[in-house]
C-alpha cells in the first residue's frame, strides 16, 4: 500500500504528540513493506525529498515559525496548505492521512482526494468547538470555529486519538457520524531498555532522583505556573523537593522569573527539550509526573509515564483529554487546576512509598494497551476498510 501522511511539523525536527504518532506508525508500516510518504515543512538541510527511517519525506516549503505570540501561526498554515497541492498531486497514493490541525491543509487534501479519486482519512488530535472563543476571542474565535466545522463537514473518514476527542467531534458532525478511535501509543520495548537518568547517571544533578517532573511545550495552556506554585507550597514540608521541567516555549522566561519570585529557583530545574531517551530516563528517575494542562487532545506523556511505572497527577478541565487516561486513586490523581490541589495530590504520592510498587504495577498494566506495534496493526485494518 502506498500511504501519504500530511502534517506540517515533522519529527524529530519538531517534537510533539502528532509528530511522534506519524513517525512511530509510519516507520512500522514501512517495515511491513508499505511505501510510506510524509508531506510536511522542510525542516532539514539538503534535498527537498529525503529518505528517513524507511519513509520518504517531502519538504513542500521552507521552514517557518510554527508559533507566533504563543499561538499557531495562521500565515504558516496557509503557506503550507498552498505549497502542499503541487507535490501531492504529482504522485498517486492508495490513501492519504491528514492530521486535521491546523486545518487549512485539510482542504488541500480534500481537493487532491476528489481529483485523484484517492481515499482520505482525517486524523483528529483535538476538536475544539467552543474553546475557539477562549483561544482567540469572540470575533476571531467564531472564524476558527467555522473553519473547524467546515473541515468536519468535508471529512468522511475520521479517526480520533481518544474517546474524549471523539465525543467533541461528534458534537461538530452529529452523533450519527462514524468515527474510529485509535489512540497514541508508546514503544514499550524501547522504554523498558532505558535506565533512569538519576540513578548512577551524570545526567541528573548529583545523581539525585527528581520528585516531580513535567514534560511538554511551555505555553500558557500547559499551566506550568500552577505547578511551580504547587512546588512552593510543597517546599514547606519537603525543603529539598526537586522538580524537573522538560520542554521549551514562549513561557519559559516568565516561568523562570516565577521560580525566583516564589523562592523555588533551587528546587525547579529547567532542562529544555530533550531527546527521547533522555526524556524517558528523566521520567523513570521521577516519583510523579504532573500534567496541569487545561487543553490536551490526548496526553501522550501520561502513557509514557505509565510505561515508566510513574503515577500521574493531572487536572479536571473541560478540554483536557488526559484526565480520561488516569483512574483517580489508582494510577495517580485527577484534581482541580489549583496549586493547593496539585500539591496535595503530589504529597500523597510522595508519602506512600510502601505502596509505590503497587501503583507502578497499575500504571505499567495500563500502558500495555498502548503499544505502537498493536496500534499500527489496527491502523492498517482501518485503512484497508476504505479501499
Image (tube, grey):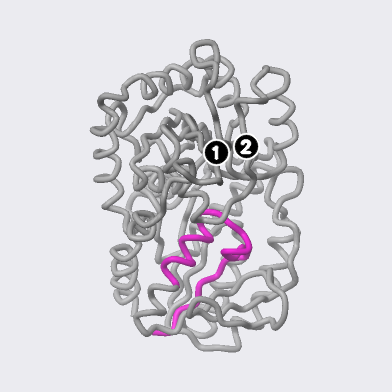
Q: Which residue ends up furthest to the top in the rendered image? A: 236
The answer to whether residue 177 is seen in the rendering is no
Q: Quadrant of the N terminus?
A: bottom left
Label disc, if present, on residue 46 of the rendered structure: none
Label disc, if present, on residue 130 of the rendered structure: 1
Q: Residue at x 55, y 46 (%)?
A: 202
Of residue 299 and residue 231, the one placed in the foreground of this image is 231
Of residue 241 and residue 58, the one placed in the foreground of this image is 241
Of residue 350 and residue 378, the one placed in the foreground of this image is 350
Q: Residue at x 47, y 84 (%)?
A: 93
Tell me where the magenta segment starts and ends, as one range.
Answer: 1-26
Q: Quadrant of the C terminus?
A: bottom left
Number of numbered labels in the structure image: 2
Residue that carries the numbered disc 2 in the rendered image: 133
Horizontally, residue 59 falls left or right of residue 131, namely right
Horizontally, residue 285 falls left or right of residue 91, namely left
Of residue 57 and residue 230, the one placed in the foreground of this image is 230
Crowding at dot 1, Cα within 10 Å, few <14 / some 14-19 / many 20+, comes out as: some
- Based on the picture, tell me whether residue 3 belongs to the magenta stretch: yes
**Label 2: element kind:** helix
Crowding at dot 2, Cα within 10 Å, few <14 / some 14-19 / many 20+, comes out as: some
The image position of residue 25, as x and y in percent, is 41, 68
Amino acid at each position: 500500500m502506498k500511504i501519504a501522511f500530511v502534517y506540517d511539523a515533522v519529527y524529530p525536527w519538531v517534537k510533539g504528540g502528532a509528530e511522534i504518532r506519524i513517525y512511530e506508525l509510519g516507520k512500522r508500516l514501512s517495515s511491513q513493506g508499505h511505501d510510506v510518504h510524509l508531506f510536511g515543512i522542510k525542516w532539514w538541510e539538503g534535498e527537498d525529498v529525503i529518505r528517513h527511517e524507511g519513509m520518504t519525506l517531502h519538504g513542500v516549503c521552507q521552514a517557518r515559525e510554527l508559533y507566533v505570540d504563543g499561538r499557531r501561526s495562521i500565515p504558516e498554515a496557509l503557506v503550507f496548505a498552498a505549497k502542499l497541492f503541487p507535490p501531492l498531486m504529482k504522485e498517486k497514493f492508495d490513501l492519504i492521512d491528514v492530521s486535521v490541525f491546523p486545518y487549512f491543509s485539510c482542504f488541500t487534501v480534500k481537493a487532491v482526494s476528489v481529483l485523484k479519486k484517492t481515499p482520505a482519512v482525517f486524523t483528529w488530535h483535538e476538536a475544539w468547538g467552543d474553546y475557539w472563543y477562549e483561544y482567540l476571542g469572540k470575533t476571531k474565535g467564531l472564524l476558527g470555529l467555522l473553519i473547524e466545522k467546515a473541515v468536519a463537514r468535508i471529512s468522511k473518514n475520521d479517526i480520533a486519538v481518544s474517546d474524549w476527542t471523539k465525543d467533541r467531534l461528534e458534537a461538530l458532525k452529529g452523533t450519527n457520524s462514524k468515527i474510529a478511535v485509535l489512540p497514541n501509543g508508546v514503544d514499550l520495548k524501547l522504554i523498558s531498555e532505558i535506565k533512569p537518568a538519576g540513578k548512577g547517571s551524570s545526567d541528573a544533578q548529583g545523581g539525585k532522583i527528581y520528585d516531580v517532573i513535567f514534560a511538554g511545550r511551555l505555553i500558557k495552556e500547559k499551566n506550568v505556573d500552577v505547578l511551580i506554585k504547587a512546588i512552593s507550597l510543597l517546599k514547606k514540608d519537603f525543603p529539598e523537593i526537586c522538580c524537573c521541567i522538560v520542554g521549551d516555549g514562549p513561557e519559559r522566561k516568565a516561568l523562570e522569573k516565577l521560580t525566583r519570585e516564589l523562592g523555588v529557583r533551587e528546587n525547579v530545574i529547567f532542562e529544555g527539550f530533550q531527546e527521547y531517551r533522555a526524556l524517558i530516563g528523566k521520567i523513570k528517575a521521577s516519583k510523579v509526573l504532573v500534567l496541569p494542562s487545561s487543553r490536551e487532545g490526548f496526553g501522550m506523556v501520561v502513557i509514557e509515564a505509565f510505561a515508566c511505572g510513574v503515577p500521574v497527577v493531572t487536572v479536571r478541565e473541560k478540554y483536557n483529554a488526559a484526565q480520561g487516561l488516569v483512574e483517580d486513586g489508582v494510577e495517580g490523581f485527577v484534581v482541580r487546576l489549583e496549586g493547593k490541589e496539585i500539591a496535595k495530590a503530589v504529597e500523597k504520592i510522595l508519602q506512600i512509598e510502601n505502596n509505590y510498587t503497587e501503583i507502578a504495577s497499575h500504571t505499567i498494566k495500563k500502558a500495555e494497551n498502548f503499544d505502537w506495534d498493536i496500534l499500527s496493526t489496527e491502523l492498517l485494518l482501518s485503512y484497508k476498510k476504505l479501499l
